């Protein structure tokens, strides 16, 4: 694949199909007759960018042509992401009625079903990570599967995503607002984005040096992603985004534009994306998807 | 250890200390300065019988003297059990104010913190399963660790504990009430009890035949445990149990005494316990703890 032949929307569409097909298979195996599985399916298949699983596949592709080995862990990561959205949307947390343009899980089903659907997705993600074989003969060695479970349970856990959510809903400023904001985002979304590229690379036996550079990439785009999220909350079109905009300012949330100003935030995001692309310079595999995804983060409108 | 020397309360106390010490280490590593970890600790260390982890250790002991290998998975199972109690107690589920004699997690902290503490315990349980080494040099081989993760994520998941909870809160009778009740309990508590003895046995490299018999044991005591739970809800002392009794009848819950009568329920539980003890007859390891635990299930008062 050369530079001219690479078209990001086609790449994203192709990967999204791959991911969605695999997620459907996982859900069918859970038993779609059950209301619980239907609630899980409702949220998992509600759309979304599939950024995390696509990053896992693109990271694997930067290392090896066998990127398909990363598909089970990519889908497990998306299941964990979806569970976190279901729980974050609950009345006792962010109390959101809409997600991806449709009613949130607790609005479509009930609060109890939404809590359990989230629990189900989280638990089943580990089943998929430990047992990728039911629909898939190609998967990493057992040692690597365990490494992936370790890194994902860390990134999604009490010192990762969940702690980030606590910092978001239970503001407890001891450091500067900007340091707090960066730490919160690193935990809430950054660690799982880094885990996505890390797990993808591990799936294809990447060497330590490559993993190190991919983790820098993940770290930089993760922060840039949050900054652009905050920018979109100020400047975005709610119809395109499928959720309300302007809510951060109304809710007095601390945000990058609020602390640094809009222009400075844009400049900072751009620097981070440049750094992310630089971290890929010594790769021999196909890094065009990762480069294009990094650039897309700056220019996205949803 | 001979028959005369075995005293169950001493055994249970010794194992409880072992389990509590290990759970404390896990929680300290999560960072007790964090409110999230404190909420996790509040519920994990609130007491409780430690039935599941003790079963894992006792099952391992029926197979091998190296039963200590089962300690990490035993504690992970208790963390998963505690997460399920925290979420089941939430206002949108069973709406319980008391658990183990103290305010439930959402009463002591908040609903949001309780949801996240549950999520944190569930996620971190898989970290403990995949990475037992931080405080523990003795643990099963990697192949076995993966097998344990598979069986626990299945037992705790959409076709296990979570589905059982859905059946409990969202009654949908298509079969006879008794069949429904048995299936609900098998999923809600039975599969995790079976998983406890199964994981314990796997931890010490038990042979397939032994595992099969231990799973029969787990299955029988699991059902007996639920029947005695229902009996205690009719006959029990709420002060000893740390929770309200008589609530099943008030809430029109379907129960074994309600469907079979009290005497028939007691007889059925006794038969199950006899069957459980019979399944242990060909073991060469120390099965006294498992036998005594089975008998205790019949005679317990909390």
Image (tube, coloured by chain):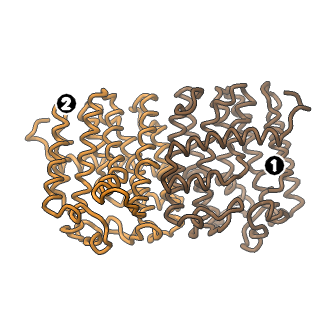
Chain colours: A brown, B orange
SS assignment at label 1: helix
- Could you confirm whether marks 1 and 2 are on the same chain? no
The furthest residue to the left:
B4
Mark 2 closeness class: few <14, some 14–19, many ≥20 residues within 10 Å: few
Q: Which residue is mark 2?
A: B283
- Left or right, A135 with respect to A196, comes to left
Rendered position, A21 above or below B248: above
- Horizontal and vertical percent for residue B218? 27, 43
Quadrant location, the C terminus of chain A: bottom right
Quadrant location, the N terminus of chain A: top right
Nearest the camera: B164 or A149? Answer: B164
- Left or right, A101 with respect to B189, comes to right
Q: Is residue A166 visible?
A: no
The furthest residue to the right:
A4
Q: Which residue is mark 1?
A: A297
Q: Quadrant of residue B64?
A: top left
Chain bearing mark 1: A
Nearest the camera: A110 or B193? Answer: A110
Rendered position, A166 above or below B140: below
Chain bearing mark 2: B
Q: Is residue A256 visible?
A: yes
Q: Residue at x 11, y 36 (%)?
A: B2
Q: Quadrant of residue A76?
A: top right
SS assignment at label 2: loop
- Left or right, A4 with respect to B259, comes to right
Q: Residue at x 67, y 28 (%)?
A: A208
- Horizontal and vertical percent for residue B177? 30, 60
């Amino acid at each position: 694949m050369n530079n001219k032949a690479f078209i990001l929307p086609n790449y994203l569409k192709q990967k999204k199909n791959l991911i969605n097909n695999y997620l459907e298979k996982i859900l069918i195996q859970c038993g779609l007759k059950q209301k619980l599985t239907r609630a899980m399916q409702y949220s998992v298949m509600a759309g979304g960018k599939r950024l995390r699983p696509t990053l896992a596949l693109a990271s694997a592709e930067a290392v090896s042509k066998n990127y398909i080995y990363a598909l089970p862990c990519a889908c497990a990561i998306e299941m964990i992401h979806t569970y976190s959205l279901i729980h974050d949307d609950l009345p006792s947390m962010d109390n959101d009625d809409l997600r991806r343009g449709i009613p949130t899980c607790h609005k479509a089903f009930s609060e109890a079903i939404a809590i359990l659907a989230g629990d189900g997705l989280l638990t089943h993600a580990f089943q998929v990570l430990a047992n990728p074989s039911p629909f898939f003969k190609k998967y990493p060695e057992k040692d690597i599967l365990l490494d992936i479970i370790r890194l994902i349970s860390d990134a999604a856990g009490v010192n990762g995503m969940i702690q980030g959510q606590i910092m978001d809903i239970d503001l407890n400023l001891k450091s500067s607002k900007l340091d707090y904001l960066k730490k919160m985002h690193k935990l809430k979304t950054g660690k799982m984005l880094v885990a996505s590229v890390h797990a993808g690379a591990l799936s294809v036996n990447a060497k330590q040096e490559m993993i190190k550079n991919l983790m820098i990439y993940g770290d930089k785009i993760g922060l840039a992603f949050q900054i652009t999220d905050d920018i979109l909350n100020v400047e975005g079109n709610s119809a395109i985004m499928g959720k309300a905009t302007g809510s951060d300012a109304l809710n007095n949330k601390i945000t990058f534009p609020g602390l640094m100003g809009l222009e400075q935030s844009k400049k900072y995001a751009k620097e981070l994306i440049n750094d992310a692309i630089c971290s890929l310079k010594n790769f021999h595999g196909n890094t065009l998807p990762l480069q294009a995804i990094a650039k897309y983060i700056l220019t996205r409108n949803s």
